[in-house]
Image (cartoon, rainbow, N blue to C red):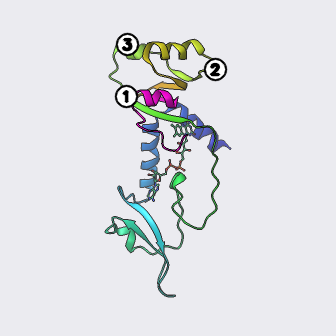
Amino acid sequence: MSLLLLLLIIFFLLAIKILQSILLRTCLILGVKVHIGTTFDKLVEPANRNSSWTVKTTPSSCPVCSYGFDMIIGADGKQNSLPGFPTKEFRGKLALAITVNFVNSGSESETQADEISGVTSVYKQDFFNNLISQHGIDLENLVYYRGETHYFVMTAKKTSLLERKVIKKVRRGR
Ligand SMILES: Cc1cc2nc3c(=O)[nH]c(=O)nc-3n(C[C@H](O)[C@H](O)[C@H](O)COP(=O)(O)OP(=O)(O)OC[C@H]3O[C@@H](n4cnc5c(N)ncnc54)[C@H](O)[C@@H]3O)c2cc1C
């Protein structure tokens, strides 16, 4: 429970970039090897009793392909590349989230901008209506934190993204 609390505090006080660097450094100190630009493709069954489970990766020249494994843990998010495990998918209403980091040059106007810990269009109608009328941007919610970068998370309406050509075409009617 206290670990969860600590993670929550870190999440809200630190820029995501710094948090990711801390986690990566911790992994490296513990001896984790990171192979950048390598995709796990599939598990390869042992050819006989004396050999081990191996993996196929892209590129195939990655040293990981020569390892024998006793255990493999998939941490690939929604991709779920390890076959044979049941998955659950929650399909809610369509929501298109965008995370953006802008360079923070530390100018006076940048340091004066108010941070937004989270607003939704239902509760701050004037704010969101102004965004539409003045900038043609239709959002459902918005978060803004200032740190090493200007960090934004927002959920944009599909029609707004279509108008601004962020989405070129709606394929499955969602
Ligand atoms: C816009 C947005 C905002 C969010 N905000 C918050 C928030 O404020 N607080 C919060 O708690 N959560 C938030 N989340 C959710 C959070 O980001 C996810 O729950 C979390 O990242 C899931 O972590 P994960 O390690 O399971 O998967 P991921 O972060 O998706 O990591 C999976 C990794 O595996 C890699 N991968 C996939 N397939 C393969 C393969 N075959 N071979 C090799 N590598 C592979 C991917 O490239 C990726 O790097 C947000 C998500 C989004 C999209």
Which of 66/126 is in front? 126
Question: Looking at the image, is mark 2 or mark 3 earlier in the sequence?
Answer: 3
Q: Secondary structure at mark 1?
A: strand
Whether 52 is drawn above or below 27: the answer is: below
**Which residues make up the magenta segment?**
152-174
Which amino acid type is shown beneath numbered disc 2? Val
Q: Does residue 122 show up magenta in the picture?
A: no
The residue sitting at 38% across, 74% down in the picture is 66
For label 1, the residue is 102
Q: Name the disc covering residue 13, or none.
A: none
Q: Does residue 153 show up magenta in the picture?
A: yes
Q: Secondary structure at mark 2?
A: loop
For label 2, the residue is 122
Q: Nearer the viewer, mark 2 or mark 3?
A: 2
Q: Are marks 1 and 3 in contact (CB under 8 Å)?
A: no
The residue sitting at 50% across, 20% down in the picture is 115
Regarding residue 26, the answer to whether it shows in the image is yes
Q: Nearer the viewer, mark 2 or mark 1?
A: 2
Distance CA(mark 2)–CA(mark 1): 27 Å
For label 3, the residue is 109
Which amino acid type is shown beneath numbered disc 1? Phe
